[in-house]
Image (cartoon, helix red, strand yellow):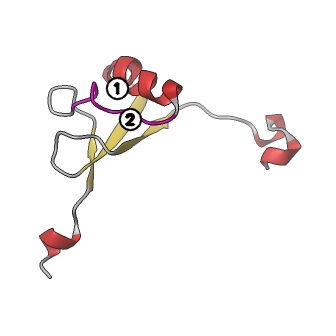
Amino acid sequence: MADQEKQKFRFEPLDKKLHNRAAFSCEHEALNVYLKQRASQEVQKRVAAVYVLTPDGKTIAGYYTLSQYTIEAGDLPDDAV
């Protein structure tokens, strides 16, 4: 099997001109709203780096965000550690 056939999905930096954010939907409305309304703004302001999982360079199957925000471990509830 060729390498291209094995790799059906790839991660790419979010590009509001290429990736169809409006069509993205998951079961958590807060994640939908973030991607559709705030992610591009945060990338532009350089406060976050957003990467999308895409099979074709347009459709968004998932995403993750790297942020400069930190949480001190001592501030987390005991059951979260």
User: With respect to residue 35, does 8 lie above or below?
Assistant: below
Quadrant of the rendered structure where residue 76 is?
A: top right
User: With respect to residue 61, does 19 lie above or below?
Assistant: above
Q: How crowded is the residue under tag 1: few (<14 C-alpha within 10 Å), some, or many (20+)? A: some
Residue denoted by label 2: 49
Q: Main secondary structure of the magenta part?
A: loop
Q: Amino acid at mark 1?
A: Val
Q: Residue furthest right?
A: 78
Q: Nearer the viewer, residue 80 or 69?
A: 80
Quadrant of the rendered structure where residue 50 is?
A: top left
Circle 1: element type:
helix
User: With respect to residue 43, does 14 lie above or below?
Assistant: below
Q: Amino acid at mark 2?
A: Ala
Q: Let me know if residue 47 appears in the view.
A: no
Which residue range is magenta in the image? 20-27
Q: How crowded is the residue under tag 2: few (<14 C-alpha within 10 Å), some, or many (20+)? A: some
Q: CA distance from mark 2 to mark 1?
A: 6 Å
Residue 67 spot, x, y in % from top left: 49, 34
Circle 2: element type:
strand
Are the residues flagged by discs 2 and 1 in contact, CB closer than 8 Å? yes
Q: Is residue 42 toward the left or the right of residue 16 in the image?
A: right
Residue denoted by label 1: 43
Q: Let me know if residue 32 appears in the view.
A: yes
